[in-house]
Amino acid sequence: MAFIRLAAATLALAAVSACSHGTPERPASGPTPIVAGPNAPGWSEPEVRALQARLRSALSASALATSGVAIVDSDGRPLFVRRERSPLTPASTFKVLVGAAALTTLGPAFRFATTFESIADPRDGRIDGDLYLVGTGDPTLTRDDLRGGAGSVARAGVRDVRGALIADAGTFSGPETNSAWDPDDLQYGYAAGTSALSLDQGTVEFHLVPTAVGAPARIRVLPSSDAVRVFGSVLSSYTTLLTIQRDPGRNDFTFAGRVADEQSFWRPVIDLPRYAAQVARAMLRDRGVAVDGGVRVGVAPVAPLVLWRHRSPPLLAIVHEMFLESNNHFAEQLLRALGATRGSGTESGGGRIERQILVRDGVPQDGLRIVDGSGLAASDRVAPITLATLLARAAAEPGGAAFVATLPRVGIEGTVRWRRVHDALGRARAKSGHIRNVNALAGYVQTRRHGRVAFAIIVNDRRADDGQVDMGIDRMLDLLARS
């Protein structure tokens, strides 16, 4: 798992979109769909019938024949529908819901804050009391950010904290890990836990360096702290085959196997607030700041002295990054942040906010079941007409052009960069979704004559990943782009 650094918070979203993410981008062959085309002619009945006939042909093969499809014009009027009100498992297209709701509720310029706080003024280099590390749900907080915070505390003249370092993650509540997720996923970074105080997207990095063949490789834990313990060993070899198992109840990791090349592995940690505070204490120690009372989880005072305040990139950039690389951790943090706006920083609280926005905008909710924010849960349900109508409504808002631009360009970048489109290249933006037996795509296409359309297609079938499915979806996008 690679941590992708978000662009500087002051950059425009267009600049964020242009940042390198490690994969060369294909040049766009047409305009990027950011406008609805207000002067575009409407769809005549013969044009709609012709489009429907072409789409039925494109979407007739393999599992596509039973897929759920909804394509609507810029006003939300259906152009082509099939099983559009059937509640289906959406996989990561579900992120469209939390992204739109977060931007509507919190605003595109919103930034999460993380702070070091105290009650006592650090006179003579000493805090006579506790030091508080307070999180509000920043999904982007990294160890480098926290190291900068430790430096700020040291520059404030603090040399000794007579009390404890207390982690305050009270903005969110509920279990860190969603009980609906497949247990097999929980060992991987994409299924890390959720907390108002989460570091490096809820994971720890293990950096492995082979030595002489047959000798133990070096295992470096990043960031360094007393929070993570390593057991077992990995042999240096000509091939790589290893296992990393975490104890279910603590951050103890056991290694076995062999490694050929220097590389890093990211694994989720548990008890996220305490882990972040333990890392922070080690960083403070490195800066010459002693914490006498250890680490605890608690609640910060109401009117503190703020020694350091870190702000995340603006929410618009966070949502763009979430869509671009389908970041589950970002989505889960945003869902609980939604709930926290009404005093319940839980998954269910966030789900209630999402539903309220759908009701306000007149978006159908047939069979909607919100289990998480990311779509990783196989028990999530949404109808294609819900996603397509939501996309149409979001694009029609005053800030709609910016929302459309948060979605990655199909065939060019992000998780949709490998789609084989032609007419739609540079004219489509979409969010993909893949888990077992699910293949889904939702987004926008800029047609040549009729402005922008919104679409959602969800395949729930054991043949979901057949080549014919992706070929049919790509053909659908090209047909829309030519319309």
Image (cartoon, rainbow, N blue to C red):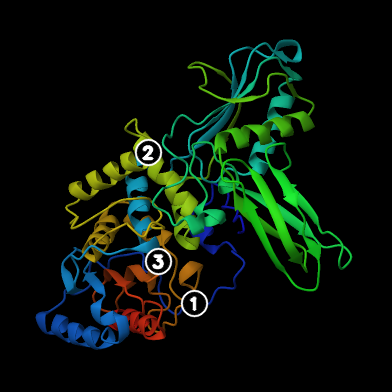
Report whether 324 appears left or right of 91. right
The three-letter code of the residue at mark 2 reads Thr
Which numbered disc, 3 or 1, marks the residue that appears first in the sequence? 1
Q: SS for tag 1?
A: loop
Can you give x and y, in whole percent of width and height, for residue 441 in the image? 35, 69
Query: Residue 440 falls in which quadrant of the image?
Result: bottom left
Query: Residue shown at 30%/83% (left/top)?
Result: 479
* Disc number lying in front (3 or 1): 3
* Disc number lying in front (1 or 2): 2
Number of marks present in the image shown = 3
Q: Residues within 10 Å of mark 2 (few under 14, many from 20)?
A: many
Report whether 209 appears left or right of 328. right
The three-letter code of the residue at mark 3 reads Gly
The correct choice, above or below, for 150 with respect to 436 in the image is above
Which numbered disc, 2 or 3, marks the residue that appears first in the sequence? 2
Q: Closest to the observer: 198 or 303?
A: 198
Q: SS for tag 2?
A: loop
Can you give x and y, in whole percent of width and height, for residue 214 in the image? 86, 66
Question: In what quadrant of the picture does the C terminus appear?
Answer: bottom left
Q: SS for tag 3?
A: strand
Query: Residue shown at 40%/66% (left/top)?
Result: 433
- Could you say which disc has been placed on residue 418 in the image? 1
Can you give x and y, in whole percent of width and height, for residue 256 in the image? 72, 59
- Kindly report the distance in space between the C-alpha atoms of the residues bearing marks 1 and 2: 35 Å
- Label 2 sits on residue: 346
Report whether 298 appears left or right of 40. right
- Label 3 sits on residue: 433
Q: Residues within 10 Å of mark 1 (few under 14, many from 20)?
A: few
